[in-house]
Amino acid sequence: MIKAVIFDLDGTLADTTKANALAYVKAFQEHGIKFSPKNYYPHLGKKWNQWGPKLAGSHAKAIHKLKTKLYSQMLDKVKPILNGISQWQKYKGKKTLVLATNASPECAQKVLKKFNLSFDYQFYGKDYPSSKIMFKKTIASLKIKPSEALLIDDSPERLKVATFLGMRVQAIKRNNQ
């Protein structure tokens, strides 16, 4: 029996690609580094620390901080992913709802507020070195077995990790596909 439903945010509940890309472009450019959305797209779903410092060099902290600030100005570009939102609605009030995302807490909270989404628990990738460890800690915090958790996500990599851990999974296609 499923006791908890774990959702990703970016690409699952909200299409944040354009907002993130534009905020990164502006942040890099403010620091004199040429950057376009095409530079961002290969890194979708990855944590900033997995790709950003390599491109930003000594400006990495400042660029990421500025990107987070600029993201607030891009919220009009964030669109709901209807497949994911309908799954959230399906389980709201019936199961423990958990957010487990690589989005920063600051950006995630803005998106959750925009779409009026709430969760019983929230876990952020910045606090864990990998999705595997984040999922393990999430399951342990909920005091449930992996088989009692359903992960709803768009990332094949995260779905594979969850399956390996014994969690149930459901793939959501990006962009309402």
Image (cartoon, helix red, strand yellow):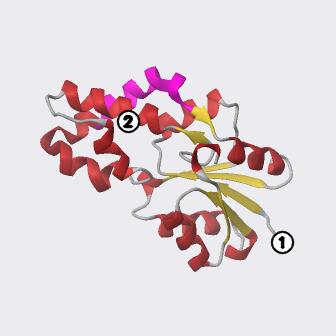
Q: Quadrant of residue 152?
A: bottom right
Residue at (38%, 36%) from the top-left corner? 21
Left or right: residue 108 versus residue 50 is right
Residue at (42%, 28%) from the top-left corner? 71
Residue at (22%, 41%) from the top-left corner? 60
Say few, some or many: other residues with alpha carbon within 10 Å of mark 2 (under 14 / 14 to 19 / 20 or more): many
For marks 2 and 1, the one nearer the N-term is 1
Determine whether the residue tagged by mark 2 lies in a helix, strand or loop.
Answer: helix
Q: Quadrant of the N terminus?
A: bottom right
On the image, the x and y values in percent for residue 61 come to: 24, 39
Query: From the viewer's perspective, is residue 19 above or below residue 104?
Result: above
Determine whether the residue tagged by mark 1 lies in a helix, strand or loop.
Answer: loop
Left or right: residue 168 versus residue 125 is right
Q: Report the residue marked by disc 2.
A: 21
The residue range painted magenta reads 64-78
Q: Report the residue marked by disc 1.
A: 1
Q: Which amino acid does label 1 sit on?
A: Met
Question: Which residue is the extreme one toward the right?
Answer: 94
**Badges 2 and 1: C-beta atoms under 8 Å apart?**
no
